[in-house]
Image: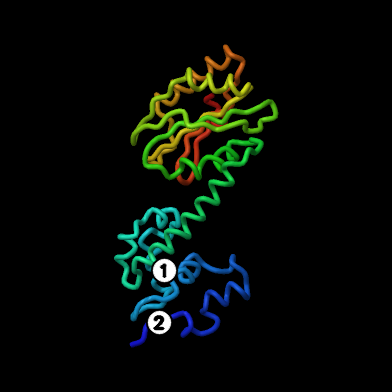
Amino acid sequence: MEKLTIKSWALDDRPREKLLAKGKTALSDAELIAILIGSGNRQESAVALSKRILQTVDGNINELAKLSVEKLSTFKGIGGAKAISIITALELGKRRQLERALEKPKITSSKAVFDLMQPIIGDLEHEEFWVLFLNNSNKVLAKNQISKGGLKATIVDVRLLFKRALELASVGMIVCHNHPSGKLEPSQADKQLTEKIKLAGSTLDIKLLDHLIITEKWYFSFADEGVL
C-alpha cells in the first residue's frame, strides 16, 4: 500500500487548496497541522493522523505546544523533522502572542490585563509575580517580573515593587501572578499580600488598581470581585 499523501486526496479534501480557495480561517486545526506534516502513514492520511494527535491533548493547541520532539515522534508517520515542524509553527504562534503583549496598551478592564499577561505567565509550571505600572491615563509604562517561585508560591518584596514604581513616576499599578494548579481562588497569603501592597501604595499615593490571579484559561480579579 502506498503512503497516503495530500496529492492523492480528492480536491475538496486538500487543505492547501482549501486554504487558497476559502482562506486560512476555513481550515480546522487538524487541517493546518496536516499542511505542516505533508503526509500521514500507510494506514491514515495526514488529516487523520493530525486528528489523532490532537485527540491525545483533547484538541488543546496549548497542550500540543508542550509536547517534545520525542513525544510527537511516537506517533507513526511523525519523524523528527515533522515533529520539529509542528513545534516550530506553534512556537512562532506563541511568539506572535508575546509580541502583542510587549505593546503598551491602555488598560480599560481586568480582561485587558488577562489578555496582556496570559501569554507570558498563563501556562507556566511555576509561579511568577508581575506588576504593570500605569500612568494617569492608565497606559502601561512598564511591566516587570518581581519574583519567581515554585509550584505553589512565590515570595514578593514589596519594597522592590515600589522602588520601581517611583523610578517610573507611576501613579497606579496592577499586580498579577499565575496559579499553575489552574485554581482561581485566592489563598490567604494572596489576600494578605494584596492588602500589604494596597496600604503601602496609599502612603506613597500610588494606587493599587487590581490584583489578578491568572491561569491558562481564565482569571480572578480582586477589583471585579470587590475584595480589593
- Up-down relation of residue 87 to residue 78 (above or below): above
Question: Quadrant of the rendered structure where residue 202 is?
Answer: top right
- Up-down relation of residue 172 to residue 183 (above or below): above
Mark 2 and mark 1: span between their CA atoms? 15 Å
Residue 101 position in % (x across, y down): 57, 43
Picture residue at 65% right of the left edge, 38% below the top: 105
Q: Amino acid at mark 2?
A: Leu
Question: Tag 1's secondary structure?
Answer: helix
The mark closer to the camera, 2 or 1, is 2
Q: Amino acid at mark 1?
A: Lys
- Up-down relation of residue 178 to residue 60 (above or below): above
Picture residue at 50% right of the left edge, 45% below the top: 119
Name the image colouring. rainbow
Picture residue at 51% right of the left edge, 31% below the top: 144
Residue 204 - label: none
- Up-down relation of residue 197 to residue 40 (above or below): above
57 or 121, which is in the foreground? Answer: 121
Q: How many marks?
A: 2
Residue 95 position in % (x across, y down): 51, 50
- Mark 1: give few (<14), some (14-19) or many (20+) Cα within 10 Å: some
Task: Give the mark, 2 or 1, whose residue is nearer the N terminus.
Answer: 2
88 or 214, which is in the foreground? Answer: 88
- Mark 2: give few (<14), some (14-19) or many (20+) Cα within 10 Å: some
Q: Quadrant of the N terminus?
A: bottom left
Residue at label 2?
4
Q: Residue furthest bottom?
A: 1
Q: Mark 2 near mark 1, Cβ–Cβ under 8 Å?
A: no
Question: Quadrant of the rendered structure where residue 185 is?
Answer: top left
Picture residue at 34% right of the left edge, 73% below the top: 77
Residue 143 position in % (x across, y down): 55, 33
Q: Quadrant of the C terminus?
A: top right
Residue at label 1?
51
